Image: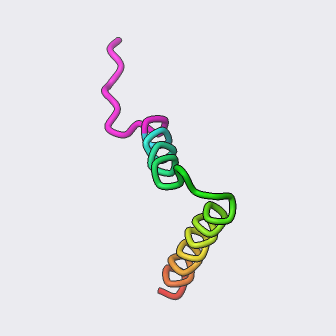
Amino acid sequence: MKTPRKKFDCVEMMHKGAEKVRRETEGMSREQELAYWQRGTEELKRLQDSTQKR
């Protein structure tokens, strides 16, 4: 039996996301990288709050 072609590849998405983070944080100091992750966390919390209020 032939396996159907996947429309979405979770591992590929994970690798692309990791590469994007590597590019964006390349050359950052520890403090800059910490601020990068804190901004992302705050953005996610705002998104979650707005989604829950609907």
Placement of the N terminus among the 4 image quadrants: top left
Residue 49, image quadrant: bottom right
Residue 39 rendering spot, x and y as whole percentages: 57, 73
Residue drawn 49% across and 35% down?
A: 11
Residue 10 drawn in magenta: yes
Q: Nearer the viewer, residue 33 or 5?
A: 33
Residue 31, image quadrant: bottom right
Q: Nearer the viewer, residue 48 or 23?
A: 23
What secondary structure is the stretch in magenta mostly built from? loop
Residue 41 rendering spot, x and y as whole percentages: 61, 70
Q: Nearer the viewer, residue 16 or 36?
A: 36
Residue drawn 41% across and 36% down?
A: 9
* Residue found at the very far bottom of the displayed protein: 53
Residue 29 drawn in magenta: no
Residue 36, image quadrant: bottom right
Residue drawn 32% across and 37% down?
A: 7
Residue 10 rendering spot, x and y as whole percentages: 47, 39
Judge left or right: residue 7 versus residue 17. Answer: left
Judge left or right: residue 23 versus residue 34. Answer: left
Coloured how? rainbow
Query: Is 14 situated above or below 35?
Result: above
Highlighted range, magenta:
1-12
Residue drawn 37% across and 40% down?
A: 8
